[in-house]
Amino acid sequence: MAESILALTESRQSRGSSTHLREHRADAPVDLPTRSRVVVEGLTALFGATAAVKNVSMTLLDRRVTAIIGPSGCGKSTFLRCLNRMHETVGTASVRGKVLLDGHDIYGQKTNPAAVRRHVGMVFQRPTPFPTMSIRENVAAGLRVARHDDAVRGTVEEIVEKALRRASLWDEVKDRLDTSAVGMSGGQQQRLCIARALATEPDVLLLDEPTASLDPLSTQKVEELVWELRADIAVVIVTHNMQQAARVSDFTAFFLHGEMVEFSPTAEIFTNPLDPRTEAYITGRFG
Amino acid sequence: MVGMADSEPSSKCEVTKRHDPPMTSLPNGGPSKRQRETASRTRKTLRRRRATNAFMVGVLALSAVLATIPLILILYHLLKSGLSSVNVDFFTNTPKPPGETGGGMYNAIVGTLMLVAMASVIGMPVGIGAGLYLAERKGTKLANTVRFLADVLNGLPSIVMGIFAWEFLVKPIGHFSALAGAAALAAMMVPMVTRTTEEMVSLVPTSLREAALALGYSRARTAMTVVLRTATAGIVTGALVAVARIAGETAPLLFTALGNQFTSYALNKPIAALPLQIFNYAVSPYDDWHAQAWAGALVLIALVLIISLAARAATRGRIDLGAD
């Protein structure tokens, strides 16, 4: 399956979709080598007896951005939270099926959820800086629980700077690393959260509507950032905004009523959807 | 009046239709009878609403003043009767036998400070731990039971707490002690601290917990570092309020710490306390002792006030969690 998707990606990479990212895409190495990073097999996520995600199977590729779109309540956020075992932290929630991270079942008997989350970073809809910590401490927060076998190298100073640079926040905060993170703007806070997630060098980054509470300029910065991250890791972004999915992603999955209706290269899904329900959604007939 | 009625529609017209000439007067030369009646009704309604509003604001202001009157009266009376006896002797001397003038409450001040400190050392960790559990394990059977019992304990008369401490600590050991008094005060403190801690921890948004979990923090580590640290200011405030409350308790000490005419630093001996000393002096027949009781009450209130101010200062440094 991964191969067929790859073949489709090649065909669309010349097109480009929006003006402001076209330049980026020209810069970005378009032929980054990839491989399957996360394989989801028959995933069903439940709240009590109600299934919020029903029997979803998909493959997420390394160095590619996968967008998940769909109307409110379609299970896209729940699906995302299954990929780093956050789903089960809510009272009656449970998961069935398999999620393989580099061939390793993250729902295996002996797997520690905290260890999974150190490899699969997550950024939420609203910025969640720790209010009692400085900017530096926020970025370094994940390092305190990192293990020696994790891919983290260098001193805390170096790691913090690198993470902030990757989140294109370094120049804005380098002179006030020891001030509270609460004093930052919403967009800065969100990029701080991304830096915090990146500091531990995750293999996969999950973004749950990361720009939903941001202004257009901050949104643009976060989108550019997502596109840059694509050079290193697999990114999954849940979004309400179809233009955003079109701008930042290589693949798009369309969810409806907990089921995955369609999973195709982004250009295909927006120009030539296979399923009539996908077409209805992207042309704005519901949702 | 006519001019007013005219100018209003004309200004509206200017907003909607820019090019119309402004209307200076209505064709028939003024508002109709119906319009005049409506206007007069509106004026009456407005007048009534303003009067009602003024009346209610007055009633509420009066309530607010009444609420503070007891405090003002108490402070006035304490200052009038007690201030004259508050001097260096009061803070440095122990009580003199009846008939001799002078003497102070050094022993009681030391005793109260020791009792409160010991009670805090015992009560705060237990209360904060219990509160954290109640908030982080909401809905479990144990949490619900503990919360209910904490509420019952909070409403328990303090004299009952004293009898309980006597039964379990004083009677088996065979004598009154500072430790038994501190234990009784700690038992009073635990449910107060538990409930305020629970409330403060519950105020920490779930999103913050999720952010920590998503970084690979374990549940326990999330609770102990991120959650507890975020709620610290509120918890400190709650704990200091509890300290202020137990500092003034008399009943739990009657059967436990007992009181002492001499200065004692021993934990296994009876110890003096300000509330006990005030009680003993107030029921005595000597005028000199009455004055000392007033002074003791004044010092006790000052102590509580200082603790409350410290609590206020701690709250001021609180981080606003509601901002987004």
Image (tube, rainbow, N blue to C red):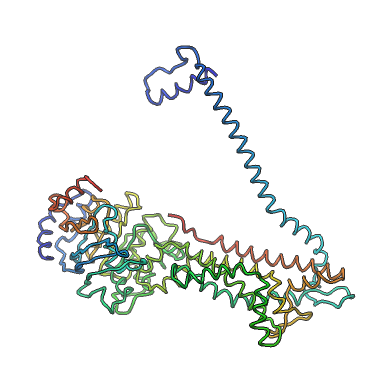
Camera-side residue of A232 and B24: B24
- Side of A42 relative to B269 (left or right): left
Q: Residue at x 56, y 60 (%)?
A: B316
x then y, percent, for residue A228: 24, 60
Q: Place residue A174 in its image quadrant.
A: bottom left
Whether residue A34 is visible, yes or no, is yes
- Side of B163 relative to A149 (left or right): right
Camera-side residue of A196 and A5: A5
Considering only vertical position in the picture, is B271 above or below A201? below
Q: Place residue A74 in its image quadrant.
A: bottom left
Whether residue B226 is visible, yes or no, is no
Q: Residue furthest right?
A: B99
Considering only vertical position in the picture, is A250 above or below B281? above
Q: How many marks?
A: 0
Q: Residue at x 41, y 71 (%)?
A: B222
- Side of B274 relative to A174 (left or right): right
x then y, percent, for residue B81: 82, 62
Q: Residue furthest top?
A: B28
Camera-side residue of B59 and A183: B59
x then y, percent, for residue B105: 78, 74
Camera-side residue of A119 and B196: B196
Q: The N terminus of chain B lies in which quarter of the figure?
A: top right
Q: The C terminus of chain B lies in which quarter of the figure?
A: bottom left
Q: Residue at x 21, y 45 (%)?
A: A285
